[in-house]
Image (tube, coloured by chain):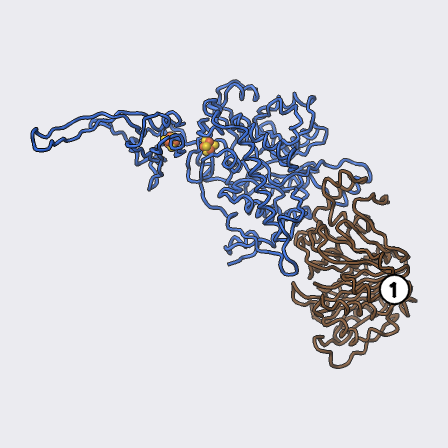
């Protein structure tokens, strides 16, 4: 079973913090891969003013194709970090040419476009690149979005981090998601590696999504270009969240009501019962059956964790104002924030969504049976 | 037959019949119960003459013939009285001395049963023993990253939706604007399909209704039962139990006066209204309640004179086309109950089911589509319809579901599958297979007759006299002498047994798949079949 770790901090942190936490939980993953998501970036990336950042892995040939393509669209490189990797990768890590993290200036003719249109075009560009990469096997693109960096690689987290020199000073973030992978289901494919990302929404998951096939069918039939891929059964969680935020206009408090609705008796007594009943009916295709623990980050940098209806996966939330952590295991939390008030640690159960807003002052527990905030 | 009797072309011997009644003279006490119970009068008390040759010891007298007479049971060979193999005679015999046996070769009766130019009509089943549903296996066992769920301990919510489900965007928008959202019921995925009050005996109907009420009110299982055409007893219409009932309207409109008149006095809305366009066991053919069964009670409820056959036309004759008919009828039924009751059509499984479904996708009111496959039983139909017409349910449901998925409307129009579910006794496995192929719910009728009332009809043409009101078990007869045999309380008890055990079995299937809170509708990745062609056709995996 994979191990997950997410943190949000007032002070920018180095990626080594989350890597070390994964390492403490090493017994829970087989080191077959690591996935990292950084946002609310610190260091030089903080100054980029909303410029989109492309992260991925490229071959030399792929990089040339990328440059040609981006030039044609009108993107100019604004900032990049160069990761100089040793010639020979450590055992278990495949040889790659380039790990790319590069920020771009928007094309001039994008000026004056609405936010929505820009978001749409960024997504379309990422999908286009992904498609090109799949054709020639020369690019793997994880994200293309302002203030977001993603790195995924096969191998043990610590080994990969040292190999990629992730302890560098220009790579820092206030919000990070990390997954130590236990490869089980499918052939190792970096697109199957968590966290998954779409338009500012990122999630990662533990466990197996038994309702995968019908949910995938439903999402793919929505006619939204980003709902593709699904090399992993967990990718649908990200897309369901995206769907409920963007298409249904529902906040994170509602997410659990979409994926694991209350049972009828509980709905009867719920203050928003009649609304929730309708929601349950029309969103029934997105009900998950677990066992899953989902951690994620919203476009506004809110962190959250939810459990499936049976709570068959571990997770603990803890920390102190200014630094909160969500971890698969207590030892990961202990390693990251040893000086917290442990009596405030919280293990979300089957009805809970734990939410840490971007102010990072508290962990808000939202029980599914409680009244919901008004819809706007 | 005496040596000089007439042998007509259609004179049959006992051997020519499908069933031969064996009777054991030594054990018979001549109580007469068998002849009294036989619904078709296949046997009669008769006189037999026997010659014995007596040779006294020591030859004191000459050997001589002795003629004795005894009484015994004789089987009739008149096709009208051919034994149907029901074995009621055996059931009532105190000494087990009588028993029907199936002929060791194909019978000749089938060539002679159309006397008077009347093709055979019968009730019962399709008489094809196997079906594809029994070959399907559940292959996706969740074990790789997780131990399977525990069917006995984890919480389960086995519910399905009946009613038009809007796409989430549309539903939320309407909620925000306080617009009309089609009514949706959360019900148990196994429903009792439509068998009308005329087709079933009052005891059977009462038993089923009592069972359903118990399941709902005592056990919290929202089981629903459809009425079939022919109305609903007035007291039920005005009772709180109406909410467990799906009222059917078919092309004969029998009993609808009564229902409409009861509208102002209804305490509860019915669960739904089902408009019948077709029946799987006789596609393109109307309903038929034969005159034998139209007694005064049935006649009164249906608003017809007693003792006349009641055929429903094959189509709704007041309507032009199915599209128009579906649209208009659905709308007027919605209107009748103030748009609070889901209304859906039922069609027979045919190659045109997809066309009907496509029509429904554009009709914002259509609440579901019930498809009845060829294996469905029926109250009365021509033998040739039952055995040779129709479309199997598995591929029909699959096509319809995949079509909805292509349109992005999967589960928005719930598909209800019927026809041959559990025909070999594997109810939960068959139902689960249909659900994973795309059905939102399944209906059973024949199964519940067999399980709850002991219908002895079989897939090898045993019994099947439901149409003429001679049901030996009292299930489908309107003659009190016959239906007194059936105790409604016991039927209710068995209905509850059936649903509870189905519930356990369904959980036993779903738990290893890792599903417990939502029905695995369309979860075709869980299915496998040892038949390449079938696997391809159904788009499930081929496993050997
Ligand atoms: S088996 Fe049924 S039909 Fe045949 S003789 Fe016995 S009671 Fe009559
Ligand atoms: S027992 Fe009754 S219901 Fe069953 S097949 Fe015979 S006549 Fe029909």
* Placement of A302 over or under B54, stated as above or below: below
| Residue at x 79% of width, y 44% of height | A369
Spot the brown chain and give its letter.
A
* Placement of B514 over or under B478, stated as above or below: below
Please provide percent x and percent y for residue A157.
76, 71
Q: Is residue B180 visible?
A: yes
Report the front residue among B400 and B474: B474
Position of the N terminus of chain A by quadrant: bottom right
Report the front residue among A179 and A3: A3
Please provide percent x and percent y for residue A137.
70, 70
| Residue at which label 1 appears | A339
Left or right placement of residue B425 versus residue A6 in this view: left
| Residue at x 88% of width, y 72% of height | A170
Q: Residues within 10 Å of mark 1 (few under 14, many from 20)?
A: few
Residue B459 position by quadrant: top left
Report the front residue among A238 and B187: B187
Spot the blue chain and give its letter.
B
Left or right placement of residue A69 versus residue B146 in this view: right
Please provide percent x and percent y for residue B474.
47, 28
| Residue at x 65% of width, y 25% of height | B239
* Placement of B3 over or under A211, stated as above or below: above
How many marks the image carries: the answer is: 1
Left or right placement of residue A346 versus residue B132 in this view: right
Q: Chain of mark 1?
A: A
């Amino acid at each position: 079973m994979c191990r997950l770790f997410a943190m949000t901090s007032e002070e920018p942190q180095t990626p080594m913090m989350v890597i070390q936490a994964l390492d403490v939980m090493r017994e829970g993953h087989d080191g077959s891969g690591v996935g990292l998501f950084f946002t609310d970036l610190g260091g030089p990336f903080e100054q980029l003013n909303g410029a989109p950042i492309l992260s991925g892995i490229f071959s030399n040939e792929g990089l040339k194709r990328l440059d040609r393509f981006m030039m044609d669209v009108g993107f100019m490189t604004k900032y990049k970090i160069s990761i100089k990797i040793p010639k020979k990768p450590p055992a278990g890590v495949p040889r790659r040419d380039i790990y790319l993290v590069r920020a771009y200036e928007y094309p001039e003719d994008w000026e004056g476009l609405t936010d929505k249109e820009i978001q749409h075009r960024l997504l379309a560009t990422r999908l286009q690149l992904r498609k090109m990469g799949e054709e020639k096997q020369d690019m793997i693109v994880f994200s293309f979005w302002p203030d977001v960096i993603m790195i995924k690689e096969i191998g043990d987290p610590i080994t990969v981090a040292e190999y990629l020199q992730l302890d560098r000073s220009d790579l820092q973030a206030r919000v990070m998601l990390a997954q130590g992978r236990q490869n089980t289901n499918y052939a190792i494919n970096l697109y199957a590696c968590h966290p998954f990302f779409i338009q500012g929404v990122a999630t990662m998951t533990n466990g197996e999504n038994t309702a995968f096939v019908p949910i995938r069918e439903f999402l793919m039939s929505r006619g939204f270009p980003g709902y593709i891929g699904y090399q992993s059964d967990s990718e649908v969680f990200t897309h369901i969240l995206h769907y409920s935020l963007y298409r249904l206009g529902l906040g994170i408090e509602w997410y659990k009501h979409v994926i694991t609705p209350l049972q009828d008796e509980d709905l009867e007594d719920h203050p928003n019962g009649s609304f929730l009943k309708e929601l349950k009916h029309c969103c029934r295709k997105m009900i998950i059956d677990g066992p899953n623990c989902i951690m994620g980050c919203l476009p506004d940098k809110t962190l959250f964790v939810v459990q499936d209806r049976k709570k068959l996966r571990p997770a603990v939330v803890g920390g102190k104002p200014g630094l909160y952590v969500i971890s698969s295991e207590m030892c990961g939390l202990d390693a990251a924030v040893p000086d917290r008030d442990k009596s405030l640690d919280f293990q979300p159960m089957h009805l809970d969504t734990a939410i840490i807003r971007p102010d990072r002052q508290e962990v808000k527990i939202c029980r599914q049976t409680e009244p919901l905030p008004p819809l706007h | 037959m005496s040596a000089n009797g007439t042998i007509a072309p259609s004179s049959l011997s006992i051997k020519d019949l499908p069933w031969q009644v064996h009777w054991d003279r030594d054990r018979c006490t001549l109580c007469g119960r068998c002849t009294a119970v036989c619904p078709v009068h296949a046997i009669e008390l008769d006189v037999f003459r026997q010659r014995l040759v007596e040779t006294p010891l020591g030859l004191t007298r000459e050997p001589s013939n002795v003629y004795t007479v005894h009484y015994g049971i004789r089987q009739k060979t008149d096709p009208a009285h051919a034994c149907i193999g029901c074995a009621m005679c055996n059931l009532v015999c105190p000494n087990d001395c009588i028993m029907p046996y199936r002929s060791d070769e194909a019978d000749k009766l089938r060539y002679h049963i159309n006397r008077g130019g009347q093709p055979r009509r019968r009730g019962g089943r399709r008489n094809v023993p196997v079906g594809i549903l029994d070959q399907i296996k559940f292959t996706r066992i969740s074990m790789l990253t997780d131990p399977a769920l525990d069917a006995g301990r984890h919480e389960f919510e086995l519910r399905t939706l009946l009613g038009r489900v809007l796409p989430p965007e549309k539903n939320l928008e309407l909620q925000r604007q306080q617009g009309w959202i089609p009514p949706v019921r959360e019900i148990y995925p196994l429903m009792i399909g439509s068998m009308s009050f005329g087709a079933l005996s009052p005891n059977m109907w009462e038993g089923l209704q009592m069972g359903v009420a118990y399941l709902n009110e005592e056990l919290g299982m929202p089981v629903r039962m459809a009425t079939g055409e022919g109305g609903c007893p007035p007291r039920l219409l005005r009772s709180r139990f109406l909410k467990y009932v799906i009222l059917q309207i078919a092309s004969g409109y029998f009993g609808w006066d009564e229902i409409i008149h009861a509208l102002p006095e209804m305490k509860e809305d019915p669960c739904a209204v089902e408009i019948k366009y077709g029946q799987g066991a006789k596609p393109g053919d109307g309903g038929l309640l034969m005159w034998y069964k139209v007694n005064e009670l049935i006649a009164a409820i249906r608003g017809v004179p007693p003792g006349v056959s009641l055929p429903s036309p094959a189509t709704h004759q007041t309507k032009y086309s199915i599209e128009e008919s579906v649209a208009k009828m659905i709308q007027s039924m919605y209107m009748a109950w103030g748009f609070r009751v889901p209304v859906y059509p039922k069609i027979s499984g045919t190659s045109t089911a997809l066309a009907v479904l496509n029509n429904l996708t554009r009709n914002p009111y259509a609440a579901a589509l019930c498809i009845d496959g060829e294996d469905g039983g029926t109250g009365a139909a021509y033998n040739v319809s039952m055995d040779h017409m129709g479309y199997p349910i598995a591929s029909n449901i699959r096509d319809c579901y995949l079509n909805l998925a292509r349109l992005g409307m999967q589960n928005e129009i719930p598909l209800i599958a019927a026809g041959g579910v559990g025909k070999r006794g594997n109810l939960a496995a068959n139902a689960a297979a249909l659900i994973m192929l795309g059905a939102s719910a399944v209906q059973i009728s024949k199964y519940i007759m067999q399980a709850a009332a002991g219908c002895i009809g079989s897939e090898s043409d045993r019994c099947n006299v439901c149409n003429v009101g001679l049901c030996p078990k009292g299930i489908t007869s309107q003659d009190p002498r016959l239906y007194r045999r059936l105790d409604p309380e016991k039927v209710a008890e068995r209905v509850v047994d059936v649903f509870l055990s189905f519930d356990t079995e369904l959980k036993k299937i779903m738990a290893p798949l890792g599903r417990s809170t939502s029905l695995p509708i369309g979860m075709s990745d869980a299915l496998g079949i040892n038949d390449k062609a079938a696997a391809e056709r159904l788009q499930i995996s081929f496993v050997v």
